[in-house]
Image (cartoon, rainbow, N blue to C red):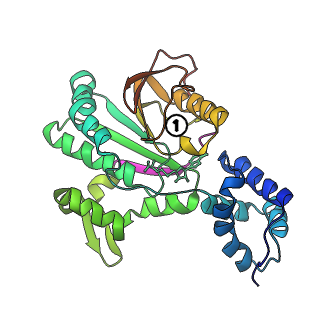
């Protein structure tokens, strides 16, 4: 069954509201063509005649809500996305860490981890740093709201553009930290020992996450409105140690929303003295 007609305004608004309710992502009429493109196939697969029927399914099925979240989120990512922040990690953050906190475990949060490239990139750089500083310990948690994309992150197998670009940028790291098996090219056990993934909605208080020394919150704030960004940043701060570093994406600015986060250099902020309680 095909849907050959558009949704009327009320139904479109109700769908935008469902997106906001389940993900906090702010959508409006300008996003309708994209949203329609993502939902249409699903609605046809379910054999539903209309977008309004789909809204009724969403109201009654938790499984459908999970699929809906997978569909409406944008999961674009890559290894070493935005090279300057990885330079910062290698040249400043990790050496400073080793100099001041050598005996502690470095705790890192990839807070909108998508298919995992950001978490695995961090793990490769920590491993490289550890080769020079064998006492270093680190643990990386990747979280995302989409169960579907997190399943890919956990499997840690990469192909196509993602792998090609890593091979071009850092062939020596592919050689060192990836293994070929019958199902493809996957991250090695050396990295897996330090990285875990779990579902977390950034609008929820991170009660059992952290405290972290480094948070990567990149290319996700852009999907939220100003109030949403403020709420998410307040939550993220609750899981950061005082003095911890927060890194955002290239098109994200915290100038209007960064209560308690001091600008350090472009894309990089430092958590000021704690105003919130430690997570339980
Ligand atoms: C464009 S990707 C960014 C991936 C990676 N951080 C990067 O910069 O390459 C955005 C991710 O944010 C996730 N996301 C969207 N809304 C979220 C929310 N409310 N809580 C947690 N994750 C969310 C999406 O599922 C998606 O995987």
Q: Position of residue 82 (x, y in %)?
A: 34, 46
Name the quadrant of the C terminus.
Answer: top right
Q: Nearer the viewer, residue 149 or 100?
A: 149
Quadrant in the rendering for residue 48: bottom right
Seen as rendered, the residue at the extreme bottom is 1
Magenta stretch?
194-203
Single out the residue that lies furthest toward the front: 30
Residue placed under numbered mark 1 in the picture: 209
Quarter of the image that includes the N terminus: bottom right
Instruction: Out of 203 and 20, give the one closest to the viewer.
Output: 20
Q: Residue at x 59, y 31 (%)?
A: 235
At x 19%, y 45%, the residue is 128
**Hey, which residue is sitting farthest left in the picture?**
132
Please tell me whether residue 124 belongs to the stretch shown in magenta.
Answer: no
The residue positioned 64% from the left and 58% from the top of the image is 69
Please state if 239 lies on the left or on the right of 126 as rendered: right
Relative to 219, say whether 273 is above or below. above
Residue 280 visible in the snapshot: no
Q: In which quarter of the image is residue 214?
A: top left
Q: Residues within 10 Å of mark 1 (few under 14, many from 20)?
A: some
Q: Is residue 85 visible?
A: yes
Where in the figure is residue 252, as x and y percent of width and height? Answer: 48, 37
Is 231 in front, or is 185?
231
| In this view, 48 is above or below 77 | below
Q: In this view, does 47 lie to the left or right of 212?
A: right
Q: Does the residue labelled 1 lie within 8 Å of ligand 1?
A: no
Q: Where is residue 46 in the image (x, y as percent from the top left)?
A: 74, 77
Instruction: Give the residue displayed 31% in from the left and 50% down from the top.
Output: 80
Above or below, 19 against 93 in this view is below
Residue 2 image offset from top left, x and y in percent: 75, 82
């Amino acid at each position: 069954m095909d849907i050959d007609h558009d949704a009327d305004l009320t139904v479109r608004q109700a769908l935008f509201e469902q997106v906001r309710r389940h993900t906090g992502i702010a959508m409006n009429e300008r996003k309708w063509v994209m949203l329609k493109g993502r939902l249409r196939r699903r609605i046809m697969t379910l054999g539903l005649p209309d977008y309004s029927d789909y809204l009724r399914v969403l109201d009654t099925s938790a499984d459908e809500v999970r699929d809906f979240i997978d569909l409406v989120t944008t999961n674009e990512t890559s290894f070493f996305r935005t090279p300057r922040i990885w330079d910062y990690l290698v040249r400043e953050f990790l050496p400073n860490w080793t100099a001041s906190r050598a005996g502690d475990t470095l705790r890192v949060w990839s807070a909108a981890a998508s298919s995992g490239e950001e978490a695995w990139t961090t793990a490769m750089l920590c491993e490289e740093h550890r080769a020079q500083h064998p006492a270093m310990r680190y643990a990386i948690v990747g979280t995302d709201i989409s169960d579907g994309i997190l399943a890919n992150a956990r499997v840690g197998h990469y192909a196509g553009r993602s792998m090609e670009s890593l091979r071009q940028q850092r062939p020596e790291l592919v050689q060192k930290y990836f293994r070929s098996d019958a199902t493809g090219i996957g991250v090695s056990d050396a990295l897996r020992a330090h990285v875990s993934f779990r579902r977390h909605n950034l609008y929820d208080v991170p009660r059992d996450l952290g405290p972290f020394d480094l948070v990567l919150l990149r290319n996700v704030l852009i999907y939220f409105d100003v109030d949403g960004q403020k709420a998410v940043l307040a939550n993220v701060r609750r899981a950061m140690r005082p003095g911890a570093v927060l890194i955002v994406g290239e098109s994200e600015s915290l100038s209007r929303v960064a209560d308690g986060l001091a600008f350090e250099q472009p894309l990089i902020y430092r958590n000021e003295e704690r105003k919130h309680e430690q997570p339980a």
